[in-house]
């Protein structure tokens, strides 16, 4: 994969009034010529679950109703690619079900029935096929990316409906597969490091950051972000991921599998911010690695995952977290470990559950053009996946 790519994390929301008028004219024309073909499709393919459980609960269906635009701010997207996050595995098992059901419908507190069939999938990269009457920033045909809030039907489907405030224009230098690997981890990392960790471009120079479990989706994004801001980055990961994280900018790497991993960290200079992507017993020793009496912060995304991300502003504002960087150009590499076809969603979940991630697991919902595929360096690791 060509790693040196320069792009905006998220597009600027506000445009000048003249641009709005021009976009409005284009929108009227493109709506007229673009929406009729897909509107004849009342059913779509999707992976759904009818109950909570393990991978066996997945069911592939070609008879799921296509979502409809019910609000003037909504945008209908044809999904080209999506990616998996640990939250998807947790939600498959029922994690946060009552809280999310209440978020969807505050009057459902006495209703014991689940919102089945349920479509999982948080990340999306695709093409706009229809816009609500008051949508200002998108028109049919636009390539977009975004993060689907957990209380909405997800992106493991042909189509998904979101509001325009949950989307941004996809950078032209990224394929849909690459773009689908970024939104949710970007929002999570930004919310954790900025909202909870108190970091920003202006305040991060020479700060010491420890990222525990740095080879996964959030970790690989966070390494690049704080390094671009001038921080000194220490990462824990397995030995065979050291090359990856060093290539992304890590200054020091500790193999968490060795017996003296904690001791290696303890003899280092103390840290200003610790981002914990692992959880478990790490909380027992990680706090002691912080600089004393300096406002240093320990941020964990694991316990409890759903409620922590909610408190960090992820559930209600993934895109808004990224908007803080909308006017800044940062060199961030999309790290895609494996790609699965849409027919093998359960296998993709199985791989994610094995752990030891090296970036993101992406699912191609709509095959990309051949020339786009040929521009991506890849080596097949198994019949069901492609390793990047």
Image (tube, rainbow, N blue to C red):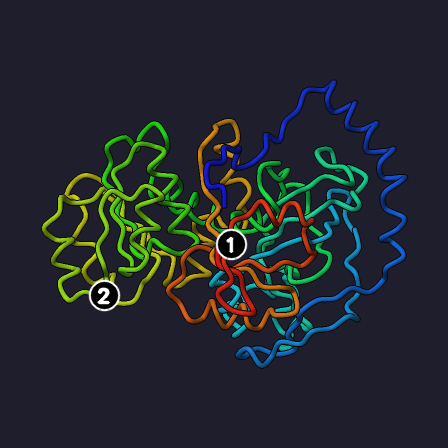
Q: How many marks?
A: 2
Relative to 95, is 199 on the left or the right?
left
Q: Residue at x 69, y 62 (%)?
A: 157
Q: Are marks 2 and 1 in contact (CB under 8 Å)?
A: no
Cα distance in 3D space between marks 2 and 1: 28 Å
Q: Please identify the quarter of the rendering in which residue 141 is found.
A: top right
Q: Position of residue 277 (x, y in %)?
A: 35, 57
Seen as rendered, the residue at the extreme bottom is 56
Q: What is the secondary structure assignment of the residue under circle 1?
A: loop
In the rendered image of this protein, does residue 118 appear above or below residue 190?
below
Of callouts 2 and 1, the N-terminal one? 2
Q: What is the secondary structure assignment of the residue under circle 2?
A: loop
Which residue corresponds to mark 2?
A: 257
Give the mark toward the camera: 2 or 1: 1
Q: Please identify the quarter of the rendering in which residue 239 is found.
A: bottom left
Relative to 118, is 308 on the left or the right?
left
């Amino acid at each position: 994969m060509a790693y040196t790519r320069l792009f905006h994390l998220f597009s600027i929301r506000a445009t000048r009034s003249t641009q709005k008028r021009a976009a409005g004219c284009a929108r009227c024309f493109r709506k007229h010529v673009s929406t009729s073909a897909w509107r004849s499709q009342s059913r779509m393919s999707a992976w759904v679950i009818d109950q909570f459980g393990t991978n066996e609960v997945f069911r592939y269906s070609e008879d799921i109703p296509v979502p409809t635009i019910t609000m003037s701010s909504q945008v209908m997207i044809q999904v080209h690619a999506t990616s998996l996050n640990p939250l998807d595995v947790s939600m498959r098992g029922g994690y946060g079900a009552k809280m999310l059901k209440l978020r969807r419908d505050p009057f459902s507190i006495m209703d014991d029935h689940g919102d089945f069939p349920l479509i999982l999938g948080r990340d999306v990269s695709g093409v706009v096929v229809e816009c609500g009457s008051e949508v200002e920033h998108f028109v049919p045909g636009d390539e977009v990316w975004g993060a689907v809030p957990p209380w909405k039907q997800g992106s493991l489907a042909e189509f998904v409906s979101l509001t325009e405030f949950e989307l941004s224009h996809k950078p032209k230098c990224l394929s849909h597969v690459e773009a689908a690997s970024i939104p949710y981890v970007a929002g999570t990392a930004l919310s954790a490091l900025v909202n909870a960790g108190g970091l920003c471009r202006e305040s991060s120079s020479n700060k010491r950051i420890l990222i525990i479990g740095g080879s996964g989706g959030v970790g690989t994004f966070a390494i690049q972000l704080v390094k671009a801001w001038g921080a000194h980055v220490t990462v824990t990961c397995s030995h065979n991921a050291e090359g990856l994280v060093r290539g992304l900018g890590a200054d020091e790497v500790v193999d968490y599998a060795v017996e003296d991993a904690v001791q290696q960290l303890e003899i280092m200079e103390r840290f200003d911010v610790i981002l914990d992507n692992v959880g478990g017993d790490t909380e027992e020793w990680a706090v002691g690695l912080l600089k004393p009496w300096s406002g240093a912060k320990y941020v964990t995304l694991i316990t409890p995952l759903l409620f922590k991300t909610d408190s960090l502003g992820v559930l209600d504002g993934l895109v808004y977290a990224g908007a803080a960087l909308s006017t800044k150009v940062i060199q961030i590499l999309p790290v895609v470990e494996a790609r699965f076809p849409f027919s093998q969603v359960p296998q993709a979940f199985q791989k994610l559950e094995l752990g030891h991630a090296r970036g993101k697991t992406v699912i191609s919902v709509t095959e990309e053009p051949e020339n786009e595929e040929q521009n991506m360096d890849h080596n097949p690791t198994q019949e069901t996946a492609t390793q990047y």
